[in-house]
Amino acid sequence: MADYRPPLRDVAFVLEHLVDLDALCALDEFDGIDADTLLGALEENARFTAEVIAPINRVGDIQGSVHDPATNTVRTPDGFADAYAQYVAAGWGGVPFPPAYDGGGFPWLAGIALQEFISSANMAFSMAPLLTQGAIDLLLEHGSEELKERYLRRMVTGEWTGTMNLTEPQAGSDVGAVRTRAVPQSDGSYLISGTKIYITFGEHDMADNIVHLVLARTPDAPPGTKGISCFVVPKFLVNDDGTLGERNDAVCVSIEHKMGIKASPTCVMSYGENGGAVGYLIGEENQGMRYMFTMMNNARLSVGLEGLSLAERAYQDAYTYAIERHQGRAPGAPAGEQSLIIEHPDVRRMLLTMRSLVEAMRNIVYVTAEGIDLSRHHPDAEVRAAKAEFVDLLIPVAKAWCTDMGVEVTSLAIQIWGGMGFIEESGVPQHYRDARITTIYEGTNGIQAMDLVGRKLGLRGGTAVLELFDTMAGIDAELAAAGPALDGIRVALADALASVRSSVEWTMTNGLADPRDALAGATPLLRMFSLAVAGWLMARQALAAVAVGGDEGEAKLSTASFFCTQWLPQVHGLGAQVSAGAGSLMELSAEQLASR
Amino acid sequence: MNIVVCAKQIPDPAEPGALDPQTKTLKRDGKLILDESDMYGVEMALQLAEAAGGGEVTLVSMAPDNKVDGLRSGLAMGAAKAVLVSDPALAGTDALGTAKVLAAAIGKVDGAQLVLTATESSDGYTGTVPEQIAAILGMPSITFAKSIEVRDGTVYVKRQTDAGYDEVECPLPCVVSVTAGVVEPRYPSFKGIMAAKSKPLDQLTLADTGVDAGSVGWGGGGQEIVGIEDAPAREAGEIFEDDGSGVDKIVAYLENLKIV
Ligand SMILES: Cc1cc2nc3c(=O)[nH]c(=O)nc-3n(C[C@H](O)[C@H](O)[C@H](O)COP(=O)(O)OP(=O)(O)OC[C@H]3O[C@@H](n4cnc5c(N)ncnc54)[C@H](O)[C@@H]3O)c2cc1C
Ligand SMILES: Cc1cc2nc3c(=O)[nH]c(=O)nc-3n(C[C@H](O)[C@H](O)[C@H](O)COP(=O)(O)OP(=O)(O)OC[C@H]3O[C@@H](n4cnc5c(N)ncnc54)[C@H](O)[C@@H]3O)c2cc1C
């Protein structure tokens, strides 16, 4: 595994050309922040992340976090607690949060760039700040002043970490099936009891306190998602003067042995085994699911970003190997000499696939993050609403497509390394193993496809998605004006958009008639829709590349062309799957599907 | 106690360097970063100022094209202000010319008692600028410091040697060059980076320094780069089958290199 090198130029390209950073910084909310400052901060963070966080990625994988059943504590791998202390001292966790709670007041987009670096450097490590960020997001939006005063500041600084406790054995994708109970007490608090599973960083030795956000049901709550409430359950209760009080009845009873992100403890949490864990209601009873939804877009975008981050890291490893490893003779190379494998067309195919996918993912994730900022802070309510809609449409794309491609690209890195790629010592398999979870948590990619079909296509009676298609098709004139170099991209994009739009329209029409038909084609439809969005943004990349020129422009244009003319046409093969309906999938009985 | 740290801004060593065939020198048109060698000086200066319970750390640098990114890093680490000398007339300046310019800039820093530098820069590594600055300023020069303490106007330095270290002391003001790797330079915090934006950064031209234009630049050095050549490609190593005489072969090889 090569040392991680934060791709500062590539990130800057997106920030300079795919989003409008100056316009974003000009918003009142970001007073005093300009593009230069933001890029300067990214550079310093990149150095810190590469030198402090990246070097413990491998030891994290080898040692993993370890649970001690005698004390129910978790020891993180060597170096993690120290690196985390440095991360907190440097104040990186608070960058995109409001100054009122000691945050840096930067755009979410800046937070996303920081997160790209940390997730590439060490995904398992990055989960601690990531889950904390989710908890902060939810508390900021829905917590009472009292709860915010008591908890937020030290979560923003990172002194305390946060967790999200949704999953239970019978409640995974189906969050409505949560059974954990919350019984109100006379002092206004609640006693929480129940078992949560798969809780990321539910217990560890990197921070003084852990603030668990727990979904539970009050005694007379209605069934399903309508009866879920959300609670703050601190590991240590917090006294009025801010000091830590009694240990709460919230215990990590074991951790999972996993395929990847081994340093990130995935905990079974037991609440209330000894009388009840003290919890404090966030907002109102039975509104927990609604609150979850407000932080869900951010959380899903962050997981999509993990796909990008691991793909970038794997690409760096693959490239490094391809310019070192001699094997075979490339066509045209002198006889009797072994060529570098980067000279073989098939290896180039893999490298170009990886590189263009990484760029496409970065475009999607950063453009979506810009949308989040604008949907929150633009002065014009109409712009805010339009951006919120845009983000809603892009979230399943960012989450599902970027994680699917993360798996694809990390797998290609192994392929480029040949046999050595299968050997753990190379460090390359770790990226693939780490990437594999991203398609599962924060709503499986199947759930993302249902989200697209069930909720997003119907936005504004279906007008929202069709308007997005109009916007995407609108780039055609610009591509035409840019001259013949972009003709290939223009034709490929127009064909792809037409094909994807007709599948979307098929689903909108037929899904109304029989939802099973829409759901049967949901995943291929999400793939098609994602490719269309990726192709559109790659076309924008191509336009920027032509304007930029030089070495950088040439490279960005070449990857954009490769993507649009060689990868994007996949959409034409997917339409049949979308419009086949549920019939053939459901034809056989469950028994008939058994192998025999 | 006010401390000056010479902070050289250099092309990022992680980027492949390129020579300009026209001027026959390293291309410096890209971004410049703070030389890692100087981060140790900045860190030591910050620690000394903290230990002294006050005093300012000022960065002094000479660089082309008004480049300040490296200085911003030093300010983000905690230095109070910076002085940059930048002037097209400085292109091609040699080590002595650089020392003249830096000495003049240091002279403009109020109450500077201690001047810290690295023992040598990472890109030029002439390793002579610190002593030249000291000579020009008429100050004592101590080299290869691995630790520095200041008490009652005297500097106590542990000076790295091949065998161990010398203990050296000298009165302020003086110039001390700091060995790489002897302290752990702090990473700028996010707050430090934001604060650095509004710290004073004086930009001087050659004329502002009062240094004679004839003693700097291409002409000032009295030297010329007449040609540049690619380094010879690394040759394949020799491979010996170890038939039992491997040890002797290694010893003979090392003797031949005059290493043993
Ligand atoms: C390493 C790790 C960390 C995690 N961290 C956390 C955490 O911090 N907090 C937390 O609360 N949870 C966490 N989880 C849990 C994670 O979010 C769930 O595993 C995920 O939501 C899927 O739930 P499940 O495992 O029960 O799978 P299931 O819901 O049983 O899904 C099994 C399969 O069925 C499909 N499926 C399920 N329902 C439907 C449907 N309605 N329509 C179509 N297909 C469907 C799924 O797509 C999937 O392919 C973590 C899990 C792991 C492995
Ligand atoms: C061909 C050529 C072209 C050049 N063009 C320019 C130019 O266009 N503009 C320009 O400003 N300079 C220019 N220089 C000057 C050059 O960048 C060096 O500063 C100078 O040659 C000192 O050499 P060194 O780094 O080997 O010094 P060393 O003696 O190895 O340096 C020791 C220490 O002295 C301090 N120091 C040295 N140089 C500086 C500096 N510049 N600023 C702050 N601290 C320093 C640092 O602490 C450094 O670690 C040029 C030099 C050459 C040889």
Image: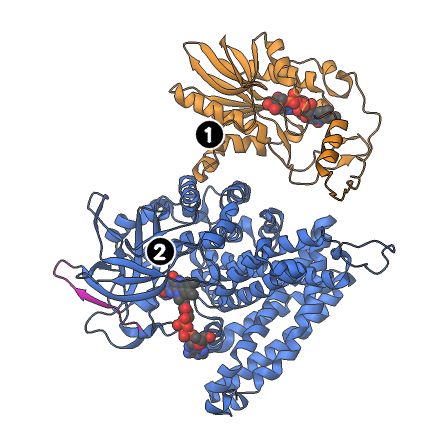
Q: Are marks 1 and 2 on the same chain?
A: no
Q: Residue at 40% x, 39% y: name it.
A: A89
Pointer 1 local density, CA inside 10 Å: few below 14, some 14–19, many at least 20: many
Which chain comes out blue in the rendered image?
Answer: A
The amino acid beneath tag 2 is His
Q: Is residue A511 left or right of residue B98?
A: left
Does B27 appear above or below B212? below
Read off the residue under disc 1: B78
Q: Chain of mark 2?
A: A
CB atoms at circles 1 and 2 under 8 Å apart?
no
The picture quadrant for ligand 1 comes to bottom left
Q: Which residues are magenta?
A: A178-188
| Secondary structure type for disc 1 | loop
The kind of residue tagged 1 is Gly
Q: Which x, y percent locates residue A395?
A: 49, 66
- The answer to whether residue A367 shows anywhere in this view is no
Residue identified by numbered label 2: A67
- Neighbours of disc 2 within 10 Å: few (<14), some (14-19), many (20+): many
Q: Eyeballing the image, is B82 above or below A483? A: above
Location of residue A548 in the rendering, given as x and y in whole percent from the top left corner: 70, 50
Q: Position of residue A132 (x, y in %)?
A: 38, 53
The label on residue A308 is none
At numbered mark 2, what does the secondary structure look like: helix, strand or loop? strand
| Along the viewing direction, whichever of A396 and A421 lies nearer the viewer | A421
Is A547 on the left-hand or right-hand side of A425?
A: right
Q: Nearer the viewer, residue A193 or B260?
A: B260
Left or right of residue A571: residue A251:
left
Residue A557 at least partly seen: yes
User: Which chain is disc 1 placed on?
Assistant: B
Q: Is residue A183 magenta?
A: yes
Colour of chain B in the rendered structure image: orange
